[in-house]
Image (spheres, rainbow, N blue to C red):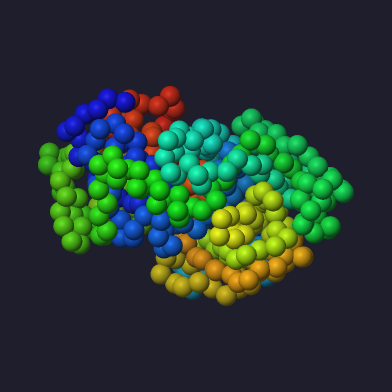
Amino acid sequence: MTRPNTRQVIVVGAGIIGVSAALWLARGGANVTVVDREIPGSEKSTSFGNAGVLAACSVAPVTAPGMILKSPRMLLNPNFPLFLRWSYLPRLTPWLLKYLSNANDEDTRRIARGIAPLTYDTVDQHRALTKGTAAAEWLTSSDYSFVYPNRAAFEADHYTWMLRKTAGFEPEVIEEGAVQEFEPNLSPDLKLLAVMRDHAYVSDPGSYIVALAQEAEKLGAKFVQSEVTDFTFEDGRVSEVITKDCTLTCSEVILATGVWSGLLAKKLGIKVPLETERGYHIEFRDPLNGPRSPLMVTTGKFVATPMKNGLRCAGIVEFGGVNAGPSKAPLDLLRRKVKESFPNLTFEGETPWLGHRPAPSDSLPLIGEIKNTGVFAGFGHHHIGLTAGPKTGRILAGIIFNRRENIDLTAYDPMRF
């Protein structure tokens, strides 16, 4: 990258996308300020509470064909990991109708083609971002396995595996007794593993974000804890970012504050159909008899990842807005599914967590400039935030430096709505 010294870039959001962009920008010589209501790595950050997997193969959106017919049964089934606060339904409905309109073969394939360029090289992107930094210690190479009760259940998931195969990912299938040889602590009722090689995971996402932020600070980036409320424009270009505590001058802005980006985007004249997908995890402290590597347990739709601070199990979905506190039922279901999958698991305690995945109605992130304003979108990554964060940050830094990555950004156009 070139090293222009006149760039004054404000990054709004200190999650994985924001700190990645800040680090790439600082490496390129820009003057960078990151603004967030929370400190980097905070437990209140969405980037703190993920399953940690660098899921290169995760190209399939939730809105697969048939979802419209299946959704009512899912919501009414207390053993299915999809929940809705019914009082929120009137507000959710406009977004939900747009979301479900993509639950067909043509749109599902289109979305998968859009996701794949952001995820396929995630391990390389994280390695490039962290090379020579303290953050590298949190990256662990591993397999990433999908757990099924039997061959029939695996074959019933053929459509999703077709999408993965199209993107270049095909599993190694392990069955029957070989499953417990591979993962000794899995329930004997789980008799098939679809193993994806050459993946990786972050063993402590919060500490990972902190280490990346500290590296950016070493290169001159500043971090401001405040809330952005507005922007100032001169001749149609952003010139200032206004926070509750100060006003910051700038030449460019990157908007990377997850689901809260939608409110700021409105100030730029665009309305993004963006909802929060309330995601839960439980971290089991000092665990024994858990998995050796990250597993997606399909019978419970959760990922179990052995992390530095315990076994983290994440994956429950709830719709209910950003303001309500955690619900009891999703956490109780997660506990039951973890116990079913790892019957001999023991632990000293648990820490539950609730966060907000930013879900655009078409399941594709927004990446690129908004209306030639100098404000660049970098949000809406739904389930691939950690996976695609470093690449998104690198793409945005490249655009600002006029050094574009070899990737077609059309699918992520912030003006597409």
* Residue for point 16% across, 50% down: 248
Relative depth, front residue between 129 and 271: 129
Q: Position of residue 137 (x, y in %)?
A: 50, 44
Residue 19 shows in this picture:
no
**Visible residue check, residue 356:** yes
Can you give x and y, in whole percent of width and height, for residue 232 in the image?
Answer: 15, 49
Q: Looking at the rendering, which quadrant does residue 408 occupy?
A: top left
Residue positioned 41% across, 63% down in the render: 44
| 370 or 58, nearer to the observer | 58
Look at 35% across and 43% down and name the residue there: 215
Which image quadrant: the N terminus? Answer: top left
Nearer to me, 361 or 78:
78
- Is residue 266 depicted above or below 374 in this figure? below
Q: Is 367 placed left or right of 231 in the picture?
A: right
Quadrant location, the C terminus: top left
Q: Is residue 291 above or below residue 82?
A: above
Image coordinates of residue 223 in percent, x first then y, are 27, 51
Residue at horizontal 58 percent and vertical 55 percent from the top: 307
On the image, the x and y values in percent for residue 142 come to 64, 42
Q: Is residue 356 above or below residue 115?
A: below
Quick one: 204 or 166, which is closer to the camera? 204
Which residue is situated farthest in the left direction here?
234
